Amino acid sequence: MADLNGLRIADRKHIGLAEMLKGGVIMDVTNAEQAKIAEDAGAASVMALERVPSDIRRDGGVARMSPVKKIQEIQKAVTIPVMAKARIGHFVEAQILEALAVDYIDESEVLTPADEHFHIDKFAFRIPFVCGCRDLGEALRRIGEGAAMIRTKGEAGSGNIVEAVRHMRAVISGMRRLTTLGPEELMTEAKTLGAPYELVRWVAKAGKLPVPNFSAGGIATPADAALMMQLGAEAVFVGSGIFKSSDPAKRAKAIVQATTHFKDPDVLARVSEDLGDAMVGIETSKLAEKDLLQTRGW
Amino acid sequence: MTKSAVVRIGVLALQGDFALHARALEKCGVKAVEVRKPVELDQVDGLVMPGGESTTLLKLMDAWDFVPALEKLHGAGKPIFGTCAGLILLAREVESPTQFSLGLIDVTVERNAYGRQRESFEASGTAKLGPDPIQLDMVFIRAPRIRRVGPGVQVLAEHRGEPVMARQDRVLVATFHPELTDSTKVHRYFCDLVERCRAGA
């Protein structure tokens, strides 16, 4: 790994697995059947969860880690890496996921937070974590805690790309700004960002995060996936967008193609033909603050 | 085709850690070219098939009819280097589960042979890329194992007595990820192979 000014970050083998997922699509699935559809469509990984975000939003209640049995069924059904979500701060759910040998834990705002103050100490685990962020400071705090992959949060279950765009732009422009600052400005910047000074210095020099940066929360079409890739995402997570559409297998395949060929409008036009209906989206600006998932965690 | 002055090595960029391979190749002084369509293979002197998910890569290759194009590239005397998933795609036989592969190197490979990510590891192994053996930093991620090595295949590196890097003529494979380390020795070895094949062709 690059010199991180003496600060410990996630293991190279864990950051490495995120590297292997680049250019790919990670799909939310709730059971083995959906996992198989995702793998057949070309997903690079699947994410096990109890309910997809749009159902969590609709039905309410406490959203928890996926049932153990479901995770095991999904692990048996596919050969691609299996990720699973744990609640923010719920380190015992994470311990269970480690015992199950899932390949990545998503400490996720989509589930109901278990701790309003603290995220999980990710160095205490032998498997890697991905965490959400809305801006550069949040990304660097999670990396400082040991996250091996970052994903911008977007607004899960909304089918609306606007929040994903906002968060990706915030991270990218935040990094660009750091590269323009002089060394004497970086400590104050670290204080403003609420981020570890060593990481701020590293990003100011490298112009990028020391771990892969993926996009999540609101991707519903091949065009959405390609938009996030062109904005700087290195891979995409798709949640409700696939299994809440009228033809999940076809849409999943199209989003996989669009993520690989994100710079090629001819391919994007072709894969976007005849996909059936996308999930019905939500105007996120009309959501009350309490209904936003992205504000969970800090 | 007239040869350009610079050696151009393609990196299959359908999915996986192609960006790190491209960076390592550029450090070795060659031009790295991302390849997403078969036609782009016409412009390269050699190809790296990176790590990623082999099932995903097969689906993406299938959609673009990559298999005949890769066979043509190999037939034209251009070297190919596959790491991890790239090795799985190049092998003669693939186990657990069995799946289609190009069969360009006579080895049998077992997928995810050490287990899931919890069992991924970093280690040091011995490689023989020149006259003297060297120590290489190796990162194994949900790695495959080479279970059988055919008679025409030369083992270039071992970890705990098992082959982790091998070569048959113009096809080079590794179960670990040299692109994740700071050393460019393995990429340098491949670039030399490409340059020799290019000069001889």
Image: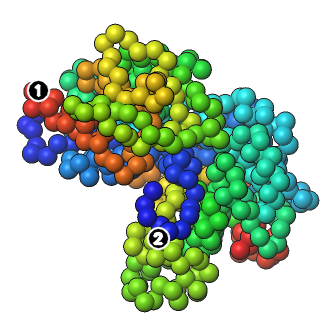
**Rendering colour mode:** rainbow
The picture quadrant where one finds residue A108 is bottom right
In the picture, residue B104 is in which quadrant?
A: top left
Work out which residue is located at the far top of the displayed protein and give it: B151
Front residue (pair A7, A189) = A7
Q: Are the residues under marks 2 and 1 on the same chain? A: no
Q: Quadrant of the N terminus of chain B?
A: top left
Residue A27 lies, in percent from the top left, at 65, 45
Q: Residue furthest right?
A: A61
Residue A172 visible in image: no
Q: Position of residue A36 (x, y in %)?
A: 68, 31
- The one nearer the camera, B142 or A215, is B142
Q: Pointers 2 and 1 in contact (CB under 8 A)? A: no
- Seen from this angle, which residue lies furthest front? B132
**Residue B149 seen by the camera:** yes
**Three-letter residue code for mark 2:** Asn
Q: Amino acid at mark 1?
A: Ala
- Please state the chain letter of the residue tagged with numbered disc 1 in the rendered image: B
Relative vertical location of residue B133 with respect to residue A127 in this rendering, above or below: above
Q: Residue at x 74, y 45 (%)?
A: A98
Q: Nearer the viewer, residue B116 or B183?
A: B183
Residue at mark 2 to residue at mark 1: CA–CA distance: 47 Å
The crowding category of the residue bearing disc 1, from other C-alpha atoms within 10 Å (few below 14, some 14 to 19, many at least 20), is few
On the picture, is A101 further left or further right than B95?
Answer: right
Q: What label does residue A5 carry, if any?
A: 2
At a point 66% along the width and 58% down the height, the residue shown is A123
- Location of residue A33 with respect to A293 vertically, above or below: above
- Quarter of the C terminus of chain B within the rendering: top left
The residue indicated by pointer 1 is B201
Image coordinates of residue A195 in percent, x first then y, are 59, 77
| Lateral position of residue A75 relative to residue B91, left or right | right
Q: Residue at x 26, y 51 (%)?
A: B26
